[in-house]
Amino acid sequence: MEGYCVKCKAKREMSDAKEVTMKGKGGVKRKAMTGKCPKCGTKMFRIMGKA
């Protein structure tokens, strides 16, 4: 899964990517992916569609 690294300011492939569920507006559940940047180790986050 590709995400944006804020520290590197570039799109990179996430390492250790996991799918998580977060609360959205109006009680809607949203899917997201979280992982680490392979270059600098910063936590990366990508919000996906509705669950």
Image (cartoon, rainbow, N blue to C red):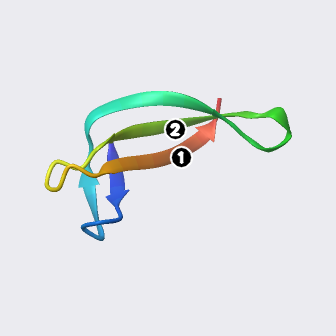
Residue 46's spot in the image, x, y percent?
46, 48
Foreground: 49 or 37?
37
Q: Left or right: where does residue 38 sit relative to residue 42?
A: left
Amino acid type at circle 1 is Ile
Residue 11's spot in the image, x, y percent?
29, 61
User: Could you tell me which residue is drawn at 65 percent across and 29 percent down?
Assistant: 51
User: Could you tell me which residue is drawn at 27 percent across and 52 percent down?
Assistant: 42
Residue 14, quarter of the rendered image = top left
Q: How many residues crowd around disc 1 within 10 Å: few (fewer than 14), some, or many (20 or more)?
A: some
In contact (CB < 8 Å): disc 1 and disc 2:
yes
Local secondary structure at mark 2? strand
Q: Left or right: where does residue 30 sit relative to residue 42?
A: right
Q: How many residues crowd around disc 2 within 10 Å: few (fewer than 14), some, or many (20 or more)?
A: some
Cα separation, mark 1 vs mark 2, equals 4 Å
Amino acid type at circle 2 is Ala
Comes first in the chain, label 1 or label 2:
2
- Rendered position, 42 above or below 15: below
Q: Residue furthest bottom?
A: 9
Residue 7, quarter of the rendered image = bottom left
Local secondary structure at mark 1? strand
Residue 6's spot in the image, x, y percent?
35, 65
Q: Which mark is residue 47?
A: 1
User: Could you tell me which residue is drawn at 33 percent across and 47 percent down?
Assistant: 43
- Rendered position, 27 above or below 4: above
Q: Which mark is residue 32?
A: 2
